[in-house]
Each structure stands twice: as structure tokens, then as C-alpha cells.
Image (cartoon, rainbow, N blue to C red):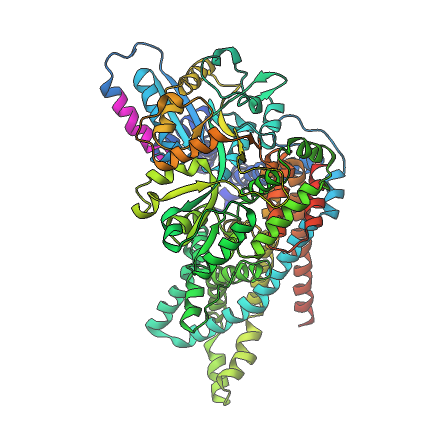
Amino acid sequence: MKRKIVSLLLVTAMLALGVMGCGSKSKDKADNNKAVANTENTADTASSDDATKEDATADITAEPVTLKLFSNLPDRKNGQGLVEQTIIDEYMKENQNVKIEVEALDEEAYKTKFKAYAMDGMPDVVSIWGQPSFLDEVLDAGILAELSEADYADYGFVSGSLEGFKKDGKLYGLPRNTDVMFFYYNQKMFEDNGWSVPQTYDELLALADKINGAGLTPVAMDGGDGWPMAIYLTDLMVKINGDCSQIVSDAIANGDFSDPVFTKATQILADSAKAGLFQTGYDSQDYGTAMNLFTNGQAAMFYMGSWEASMALNADIPEEIRNNIRVFTMPTVAEGVGKNTDIAAWNGGGYAVSADSEVKEEAIKFLNYMYQPDKLSKYGWVNGVGMSAQDQSAYMTGNETELQLQILDIVNKATSVSGTPVNDCGPSTFKASIESEIQSVSNGSISVEDFLASIGKACK
Amino acid sequence: MKRLYSNKLVIFSLVIPGILVFVFAILAPIALSVYYGFTDYSGMGKATFIGMDNYKQLMMDQVFHKSLLNSLFLAIGFIVIQHPIAIIVAAVLDKLQGKAEGIFRCIYFIPNVISVAVIAYLWKFVYNPDFGLLNNFLKMFGYTGKINWFSTDLAIWSVLIVLIWHGFGWGMLIYYTGIKNIDPVLYEAASIDGANGKTTFLQITLPLMKPVIQINVTMAIISALKQMETVYLLTNGGPGNSTQFAANYLYKQAFKAFKYGYGNSIGIVFIIICLIVTVCLNKLFADKKEVA
């Protein structure tokens, strides 16, 4: 009898453990959400507290709604992350029944987890990129909600900026920025050493020699990630050939990159790296390391997008450097038809709403709130995070940094823009290939011909 | 109690959790991988059956070949560099006795308990050509150039050094335990016979350590094949694909190139290779045992 009781107890214990192990999915999910809210976004918790305390006029009788926002802006205290968080805080203050939980990861980790979410259910509002390399598969899978383009008629979106977020004429997302690629440079360092901003590519290489001679790095390049060099290639192609969009789309469609503009641009990139334009080991160094070289004064220039214009306001960067950050665009290339005012610019990142969101209505309401002209666009400008995809002319405060004014001037005077960089024009297989192989061709471990053949193969 | 354990219901209830974990956490994902390996699934949307296409492509994929060669290089590096040093250090530690033995044992094991992410970033800084410890150290000896430790030619060696450094403590600890299990009487007898340190090490320690060496070598080869996180954080397979490893390549294909089906076919081939290597090693060591 005793043996039977012990057996029964053991079996019961095993079953109980099994049941506990399986658990309830919804409870697990709720716990996970709680964990996300607690660990990944302390700003959210703090701000929601503020919201509940401060706004007594808000509607507190409405049904509580929790929105999950998945963002690629992990730094919530600077730049675009700060802008995003500010708008979230304001929305929660105005809509006290709404709680927004933010999960933010940096770009690479974000894209990986985005895919995991795509299989298991997306958060309600997500960051996206209006480029074929990212959006094609996402739209094919039908995981983003359709938006009504007519709703945004008076939102001041720059002409053509919504195109990358459309499929078959339907709109699935909204662009956040107008991204422009620059050489950031340290004006004081240039003046102290008697260096001048190069107007031609040959002058840039000659300047690089002088900077190397002074024991500094000419251009800090995030070569470890691949994409900045792919944009560099796009920038060079614009200077060689002017508008290259048709050449790029034909090359990707046919898997044939034999057009001379690809060969010439790639050769210039490889020759520049060989000539010491970039830091030693650029092809294995990441974004942060490259940026630190520039912000610590070890590099005279930094090749990066307009989203880093907030460096001029970043208190972590020594004042002497941050006050002297200026930009210039890719210089003209010998025998090229592109002018200095033909720039590498595009509308890349943005936001969308999940098609399966249980609170889709609220999510779209929040999305529209973010894009009200006096939100993302205004706060972006005030915080010096570069150009938005909306008209910002109404938000000039007179307190703009010199860097902001310079960027605005370059964009206003642009005679043409490149559109989506070459690496983002094709399928993700092509993107993965070009961003890896461009390291090899720039450091000379494969030939230009092999590089072009390899990325062509990735398109097929 | 003995009768209790012979009760089939009890045996069943004790075994079933393990079996369920094995089925759902190992077998089912492998079965799913086999299925997806025959599809063009991108990770989202629908999967279309494409037969052996992924495997045919994989056989021609030079990056995959390169990643297997890198795994082989790593395995040889472990066996030829890491393990001989680990055995010698374990033998020396054994001889140290007293407090020093414990202190050094801890010191050598420290890299093993530090998170891989910390290790990777630590070494990224050590190797940095501009402000890294290594180049600055060389500067002290008058070398003014900047060595790119992650250049296409050097990167795989730099990765090997980090992995050897990181895994050294674990290998050493297993050897150390093996040495501790050797009967001290043998050493005493050898000492009476006039054997010196070198002779005792070669004639007593090494032969008696054979089973431990076999386990460690098998583990080294498997860990070389499975290498992923350190490489991902240190070089992500770059520059180009010079430090690419199968697991990292699988990840890149599945999650960056949106070729989930192809990634799964890599996974399946990878499992088969691991199984073949394990079986071969077992056979190799088993034969030697029989001969002995």
C-alpha cells in the first residue's frame, strides 16, 4: 500500500512538473511583455509614471490599451531614439488609457528579431526600411497593415518619399528620414593644419596623404558592416555617371554587373583603400569604433549619413570637436558627369503597423500622431538628427547648429539624388552578398571582376 | 525502494520528461530543419518544395567550403597548440602543490567563466590597430607601424588565439583532474627507480592520460565545428569570408539573406558532418584501445 502511495505521489509530481513546464502561452507572453517593459525600456516606465500623474484632463475612462512598439533605436536619450521616446511620452500623456511598451534593438539585431516576430506575431508598431532588400519579403508575407495614402495628404511628405513603402500602389509604411551621405570633417583640425575641403576625388586622395603624414587617420570608415562601403560605391557611381537608378535595376534584374560604371566605381574604392584613405583595419571595424576615431580626434573625417548630425549636440563628444563638425559631399570624379550637387540621398527608415495587430486602430492612430508635422519632423529638427521625410521649413528656430544649416543648404541645392543605395536595391541575398564581398574587393583579396561576378550571381 | 523502482508506472513517469524534452527540443526541430531544407522558405510567407536544389547549391558554395576549412584549421589549432600546452600546465600545476596550485588553477580558468560577449569585445580592443594593447606593446619595442590583426591573412590566426585563450582553462581543468586521478604510488616507484620529471611525464602521466586526451580531443573537434558566438562577435566571419565558420554562415544565410530554407540545409549537412566526425573519432579511439 505504502509503495503504491509513493508511486502515485511520484507520478503526480511528474505530471505537475510537466504541466508547469508547458504553462499557459498567454501567461508566458504576459510575463515576457512585463519583462520587456521592465528591462528594455526603463524610460518607458518612468515616462508612463509621469504621464499618469500629470495630465488630469486626459480620458481615463476609456478601455486600457497596450501598444507594443518594436524600434531600431536603442539609444533613448540621444538622437532619433530621444525623439521617438518624447513622442511616445506625449502620446501616453494625452491618452492615459494607452500604454506603449518599447522594445529597442540596434539595426542588425533588430532585423534578425523582426524575422522571428514575423513567424510568431509582430508587435503593433514596427520600424521598417522602405527598400527592396528589406521590404519585398516582408510585403510578400503580408505582415504589414495597409495604410490610407489619402490620410497623409496634408502631412507634408517630400515628393516621392512614400514610393519605397508601396507595393502595387498600396501604402504599407511611412518614411521617417531623408538620409544623405556625407564626409563629416573636423573644421578646426582642417584649419589648424592648412587643409582645405577637397573638390575633386584626386584632391581627396592628396589630402589623405597629408593627413596620414600628420599621423592621423584620413577617413574613419565603418567597413565591418559592409553597408557604408556599399553606399560609398553608390556615391561614386553618382559622381561617375549621374543618375544610375536604371543601370542598377537592370543589373539586379539580369544579375549582370558588367556595366563600366560598376567597374570604375569599385576600382576607385579599392584604390582608395590601398592608398590609405581609411583607417588600418577598416574592413573589420564596426560603427562605434569608426565613429569614436572621429569624435576622439584621431580621424579627420568620418563617412556616414545625416542621421549622425546630432553629433554636434552630443555632450559626450568633446566640445572642441562637436562644435567644429562640418560636412562635405563626395567630391567629383575625373571624367565623371556627376556634379558636387548630385548627392547620395534616399528615404530609408520608417514605421509601419502590423497586419495582425489586435489593436490596429490604436496603432494607426499612434502612427498618425507620430507623423503629425509638429512631431517627428519638428522634434527631429530641434534635436539636430538630420532631415525628416517631411517639410521642415516651418521649424527653423534660429538656434540651429552650423552643421544643421550646412546640411539643409546642401539638400536645398542638390541637383539630383541617388535614391536607394545599390546594396538595398536587390533581394536580401544580394544585400548579404555585396556587403560581405565589398570588404574583400576593397582590401584587395578579390579582384573587381570577381566581386562583380559574385554579386551578380547573388541576384540570380 | 528497489521494488518501487521496478514499478513500470514509476519508471515511465521518470523517463517520460526526458523523452519529451528530447523529442520536442531536439528531434522535432531537426525534423523541421530537414523539411525546410527541401524548400525555398524565406522565413516569412509560404514555403515551396524545391527538392535537392539547396543541397546541390551547397555542394558548389565556396563560402561553405571555406567555413569547413576554417573549422578544420581551428580543430588542428586546438589539438596542436591548445591541448599540449594545457597538458603541460596541468602537470606543472599538479607538481606545484599548496596554495599556489589553487591560485593558478583559478587564474587559468578565469577566461572560461567570462561571458563570450565580454571576451570578444575585450579582444577587439586588444587587436585594434590604432589604440589596441598589442600594437601599443609593440611600440614599446620601437615598432612604429600599425599591424592590422584582422587583415584577410591574419584574421583567422587572431581568432584562433582568442579561442585558444578562452577555452584553455576548460581543457586544462580536465587534464588536471585526469592527472590527479593517477595513483601517486606510480610516481614514487618511478622516483625510486631514478626517473626524472621528463621521464615520469612521458612514461607515466601521458600514457595514463590517454582516455582524458581522447575525450578532450573529441570535444575540441566538436567545438571547432560548432564555433559561432565568438566569431560572430569578433569578426562576423570577415573581412570578406576569411573567418567564416559553418554555424555563422548558417545564421547569415537564414537571418540576413532571408534564405531560411538554405540555412536549414546547411544545418542538416552540418549535423551529418558532426555525426560522421564523432563516429570516426570513436572508432579511431576504440581501435586503439583494442590494440592496447
Quarter holding residue A68: top left
Indicate the position of residue B112 as horizontal and vertical percent values.
Answer: 44, 58
Tally the numbered discs.
0
* Quarter of the image with the C terminus of chain B in it: bottom right
Q: Is residue A327 left or right of residue A224?
A: left
Q: Is residue B14 above or below residue A48?
A: below
Judged left or right of residue B9, residue A31 is left
- In the displayed structure, A39 sits above or below A373; it is below
Give the quarter of the image for residue B71: bottom right
Our reading of the magenta stretch's main secondary structure is helix
Residue A308 at x, y percent in the picture: 42, 38
- Does residue A192 appear in this view? yes
Instruction: Between residue B142 and residue A13, name the one nearer to us.
Output: B142
Q: Position of residue B66 (x, y in %)?
A: 66, 54
Please give the name of the residue rendered at 59% of the width and 26% of the height, measured from the top-left corner: A138
The residues colored magenta run: A39-51
Q: Confirm whether residue B244 shows in the render.
A: no
Q: Is residue A42 magenta?
A: yes
Q: Position of residue A374 (x, y in %)?
A: 37, 19
Relative to B35, say whether A149 is above or below. Answer: above
Q: Is residue B104 magenta?
A: no
Nearer to the camera, A23 or A45: A45
Q: Quadrant of residue A311?
A: top left
| Horizontal side of residue B209 vs A386, given as left or right | right
